[in-house]
Image (cartoon, coloured by chain):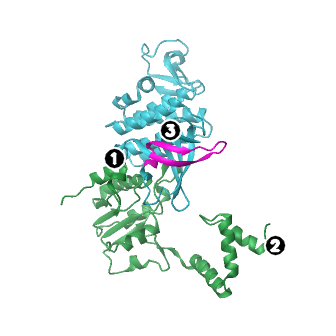
Chain colours: A green, B cyan
Amino acid sequence: MIYTSETIEQLIEEFAQLPSIGRKTAQRLAMHLLKMPREEVVKFAKAMVDVKDKVRYCSVCFNITESDPCSICSSQKRNRKTICVVEEPNDVIAVEKTHEFNGLYHVLGGALSPLDGIGPEDLKVKELLSRLNDDIDEIILALNPNVEGETTTLYLAKLLKPLSIKTTRIARGLPIGSDLEFADEATLTRALEGRVAL
Amino acid sequence: MIVETEGVILHGMNYRDTSKIVTVYTKKFGKIKVVAKGVRSQKNKFGSSLEPMTIASIVLYKKEHKDLHLLSKSEIAVVLNRLQENQERMYCGLAVVELVSMVMHDEDGNGKVYELLTESLTAVNAAEKNHVNVLLSFMMKLFGELGFGMNLQKCSVCQKSIDELDVTHAFLRLSDGTMTCSDCTGDLQTNGTKVSGGMLKSLYYLQENEIKQASSLALSSNVKNDLIATLESYLRYHSEGSRTLKSLSLLYSTQ
């Protein structure tokens, strides 16, 4: 034990278990908490407990929510004929920020990764299939442009084909503000494949 | 020590906010792990060269007596654009890297295995059909490189060459990879796995011919499945800790 207080030592240990937090950062955070007013610390602790008590997964789309079904699934203003399939709840936030999509979501909870032993049974694939009915016009696959995302896209595309529902994927290519000369071959090839007529 | 080498990306794992720990099978040093700092951020210029199945030219800071090195540069060395075109290509390519990841030890360089690995990925990328054959051929050749290759050229009892044999089935002995023809053993399953005459000749073809020729061999789905099952049990017998290839399970789950 470096510190004379066992409580501080315990707090440092707890902080150090969080992702991206090493022991040095954990020490800084613990010291900062010590200097904060008590009411601020209580507010901080309450927020952490609340997140565990109140937040759950939506039983329809598996996004994180405080009410079930979530505000997107229960909204009458959303286009209920289109479902955008994403890997994680963070991806829903990213798509929502664009204000370009007004449909519903389905969060898979990850992507297929045979190399990590993650198969279809580990994702919310069955739940997606059970949501599909005659009212659905389009499924948009918005998965990460990496091997895992690609594996999942190919898998879902094959699974959805017999259902005769229009299935699309988001475009892949160059990010806005980047330079063509610095783009790698794989990205540039995808950009060329996805070119559009003007 | 700053070193430059070519390598095949086997696996990537997210590390901190924007970095990755990548497992690479390199030409010079065998299977190594490198940290690719900031590789997941949008400004990064070599992200796609660190995806599994990519053949890349890499520059790394190799630390002596450490098992995690620092990547400083990576570029795609061979463009394999078609690997992600369809499921069979994708899963066979993944199975090739999964197998290498599973059986090769860390920092144990083997130039021949590297050659087989790149040849197989290139062949899966180029083949129009029968991508699974490429994987089977790779497995047969890899077993040979690792010291437990099969000896299918002749029957271990009567010494008749496989070309002279006209048998309905044979037995493949897992312990030493030798084959005994049905004329010598009859129907009795002595101490080996029963394989049909067709399977035996297919295995021999895949072992003896170049990997790129594997896709020209026409095999029925049943024979392919039997060959995979036989090779997987052979691998399990010889390589401790090996398991069923998950990539192939995924391929069969969608068929």
Kindly check if marks 1 and 2 are in contact, taking CB atoms under 8 A apart as contact: no
Mark 1 = which residue? B85
In the visual, does B40 lie left or right of A197? right
Answer few, some or many: residues within 10 Å of disc 2's Cα (few below 14, many 20 plus, some between 14 and 19): few
What amino acid type is highlighted by mark number 3?
Thr
Element at badge 3? strand
The CA distance from mark 1 to mark 2 is 61 Å
The CA distance from mark 2 to mark 3 is 50 Å
Q: Residue A182: x, y in percent?
A: 37, 52
In this orientation, which residue lies closer to the viewer: A82 or B115? B115
Residue A119 vertical position relative to residue B132 in the rendered view, above or below? below
Residue A153 vertical position relative to residue B52 in the rendered view, above or below? below
Label 2 resides on the chain identified as A
Q: Are marks 1 and 2 on the same chain?
A: no
Question: In the rendered structure, which segment of residues is drawn in magenta?
Answer: B49-74
In the visual, does B160 lie left or right of A37? left
Residue A69 vertical position relative to residue B5 in the rendered view, above or below? below
The CA distance from mark 3 to mark 1 is 28 Å
Q: Residue furthest left?
A: A198
